[in-house]
Image (tube, rainbow, N blue to C red):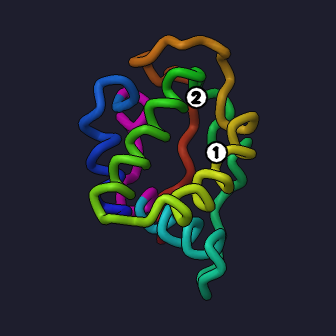
C-alpha cells in the first residue's frame, strides 16, 4: 500500500513538487513504520515528528487535502473497509496543524530552497 500511495503522490501535480528532493526509500520506510505503529502493529516509528519534518516546506491546506485524497484512493484501491479508513484518517487529521503552514486552497507550490531534508537512512 505504501508503494501505491507514494506513487500516487509522485504523480499528482497538486503535490509532487513537495516530494522533489525526497529520499523515496526513506519516505517509504518511515510511512510503513508510522502507519504500522499508529494502527497498533508491532512497528516502532523512529522518524522525526510531523512538525519537524514539515517545518519550512510551505505545505498549503490544498496540498494537505490532495494528499488525503491520494491516501483515500490508495485505500479504496486495496478495498480497505470504510471503518478502517476512518480510523486511519482519524489518526492523520490531528497531524494537520503540524503539517500545514499556509491556509490556502492553492496546490502545486514549489518546495522552498531553504527546506532541509532528513539525513538518508544509513
Viewer-closest of 8 and 84: 84
Q: Which mark is residue 42?
A: none
Is the stretch drawn in magenta largely helix, strand or loop? helix
Viewer-closest of 98 and 87: 87
Classify mark 2: helix, strand or loop.
loop
**Image: 77 above or below 113:** below
| Quarter of the rendering containing residue 93 | top right
Mark 2, other Cα within 10 Å: few <14 / some 14–19 / many ≥20? many
Q: Is residue 25 magenta?
A: yes
Viewer-closest of 24 and 15: 15
**Image: 96 above or below 89:** above
Q: Residue furthest bottom?
A: 42
The spot of residue 82 in percent (x, y) is 48, 59
Classify mark 1: helix, strand or loop.
helix
The structure residue drawn at horizontal position 54% and vertical position 32%, both measured from the top left corner, is 64
The structure residue drawn at horizontal position 64% and vertical position 45%, both measured from the top left corner, is 53
Q: CA distance from mark 1 to mark 2?
A: 9 Å
Mark 1, other Cα within 10 Å: few <14 / some 14–19 / many ≥20? some
Q: Is residue 116 magenta?
A: no
Any part of residue 52 in sight: no
The spot of residue 69 in percent (x, y) is 42, 38
The structure residue drawn at horizontal position 65% and vertical position 69%, both measured from the top left corner, is 38
The spot of residue 4 in percent (x, y) is 28, 57
The residue wearing badge 1 is 53
Residue contact at pointers 1 and 2, CB within 8 angstroms: no
Q: What segment carries the magenta color?
A: 17-27
Viewer-closest of 30 and 95: 95
Numbered circles on residues, count: 2
The spot of residue 28 in percent (x, y) is 41, 62
The structure residue drawn at horizontal position 49% and vertical position 11%, both measured from the top left corner, is 106
The residue wearing badge 2 is 57
Q: Quadrant of the N terminus?
A: bottom left
Amino acid at each position: 500500500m505504501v508503494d501505491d500511495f507514494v506513487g500516487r503522490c509522485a504523480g499528482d501535480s497538486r503535490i509532487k513538487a513537495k516530494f522533489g528532493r525526497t529520499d523515496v526509500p526513506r519516505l517509504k520506510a518511515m510511512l510503513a513504520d508510522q502507519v504500522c505503529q499508529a494502527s497498533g502493529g508491532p512497528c516502532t516509528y523512529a522518524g522525526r515528528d510531523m512538525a519537524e519534518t514539515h517545518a519550512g516546506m510551505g505545505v498549503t491546506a490544498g496540498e494537505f487535502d490532495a494528499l488525503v485524497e491520494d491516501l483515500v484512493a490508495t485505500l479504496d484501491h486495496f478495498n480497505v473497509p470504510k471503518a478502517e479508513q476512518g480510523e486511519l484518517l482519524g489518526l492523520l487529521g490531528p497531524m494537520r496543524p503540524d503539517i500545514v503552514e499556509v491556509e490556502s486552497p492553492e496546490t502545486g507550490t514549489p518546495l522552498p530552497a531553504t527546506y532541509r531534508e532528513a539525513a538518508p537512512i544509513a
